Amino acid sequence: MRIAQLTAATVAFTTAAVLATTGSASATVDPPGGSWDHTFRGTGVVVYVEEYGDIISVCDTSANGKPAYADVWVGTDPRYSMKVSTGSGSCVSHRASEGGKYNLPEGKEIWVQYWGTTLNSSEKPESPFVNDH
């Protein structure tokens, strides 16, 4: 009898713990070093930038069935594109350690164009930052 009570209590405790930690997906990624250098928000999308390590993350923030996108430019030269097609709360990241086009030059102006609900070019915000650390 006592083993059955302990087993029932353990199952109840485990179930409560799982329910307490289960929640909806969040479109926030953990920032390296405690904070992001830049955060850019658009309709259905948020972009996080950490200059040290050239980390750029794009996240889908709208449950509208459409992907979120970001294009990264060095000045006027396109560098790479990112697409999040796995639903609201999902993110895709790239960083300098991947090499090549993801290793952004220091001291240069970097532009990020991002969108999450449309392909209409007039609704694609662009935000610059200088990659200075």
Image: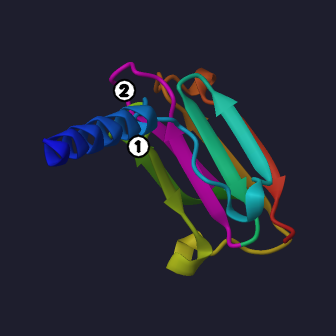
Q: Is residue 80 above or below residue 22?
A: below
Residue at left 38%, top 19%?
64
Residue at left 61%, top 57%?
56
Q: Give the residue type that dot 2 points to.
A: Lys
Q: Is residue 76 above or below residue 102?
A: above
* Neighbourhood count class around disc 1 (C-alpha, 10 Å): few under 14, some 14–19, many 20 upward: many
Where is residue 73 shown, x and y percent of the image? 65, 56
> Of residues 76 and 90, which is closer to you in this image?
90
Where is residue 70 shown, x and y percent of the image? 54, 44
Asked if residue 77 shows in the view, the reply is no
Q: Which residue is mark 2?
A: 66
| Residue at the far front in the pictured view | 1
Q: Is residue 103 above or below residue 59?
A: below
Residue 55 drawn in magenta? yes
| Residue at the far top in the pictured view | 64
* Neighbourhood count class around disc 2 (C-alpha, 10 Å): few under 14, some 14–19, many 20 upward: some
Name the side, left or right, on which 82 lies relative to 124. left
Quarter holding the N terminus?
top left
> Toward which corner of the image does residue 23 lie, by quadrant?
top left
Q: Which residue is mark 1?
A: 84
Of mark 2 and mark 1, the one earlier in the sequence is 2
As measured in the structure, the alpha-carbon distance from the residue carrying label 2 to the one carrying label 1 is 9 Å
